[in-house]
Image: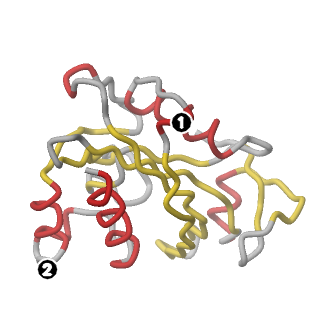
Amino acid sequence: MDELIDLLDSNGNFTGKTALKSDAHKNGWFHQTVHIWFYTDKKQILLQQRAKSKDTFPLLWDVSVAGHIGAGEDIINSALREIEEEIGITIQQADLQKIGCFKSIQKHTNYLIDCEFHHTFICELNTEFNLLKKQDIEVEDLQLKLISDFKIELNNSETKKLYVPHSKKYYNTIIEAIEKVI
């Protein structure tokens, strides 16, 4: 789905311009996203398998919930909206813990260049897994994985191919932040 988004400079500052998400991706213009990583008190992490129809990284496992921040939309409101859309639950702003903002540049093709700043949060999953409602257009599947197994898979040259290739620093920051609170 195409949507209007705010454009940023390469340092993450607003430019005062907006564009359609498709144009931002076509031209490699910087913009904002939200990433929300859910974890459980059983030391599990909620992973989302990207839908097979996705332009980038179809069927790879990724962050629990992610999405673009609409033009003029508040970061927190965007995170709460994406959570409700992608996994069908409602949480409170106070449940989110921001752990950073990560610059990411991924050139998929000459016509698809993701230049994004990921506003990244962690959040305890207080809903039973079987009550999650995945958004079929975005999400192929959901799974809970022990964080210890997740770390092993990310450090194995074969199994890490099952995951979206975020930077090692990004993944380590997520894991460390979750391990501090569980």
User: What is the x, y in percent for residue 19?
Assistant: 78, 54
Which residue bears the numbered disc 1?
94
Between residue 33 and residue 181, name the one nearer to us: 181
- Residue at point 19% right, 63% down? 162
Q: Which mark is residue 43?
A: none
Which residue bears the numbered disc 2?
157
User: What is the x, y in percent for residue 71?
Assistant: 77, 45
Q: Is residue 131 left or right of residue 99?
A: left
User: What is the x, y in percent for residue 127?
Assistant: 29, 25
Mark before the other along the chain sequence, 2 or 1: 1
Callout 2: helix, strand or loop?
loop
Between residue 96 and residue 31, name the one nearer to us: 96
Q: Amino acid at mark 1?
A: Ala
Q: Amino acid at mark 2?
A: Ser
* 46 shown above or below 127: below
Res 168 quadrant in image: bottom left
- Residue at point 19% right, 71% down? 154
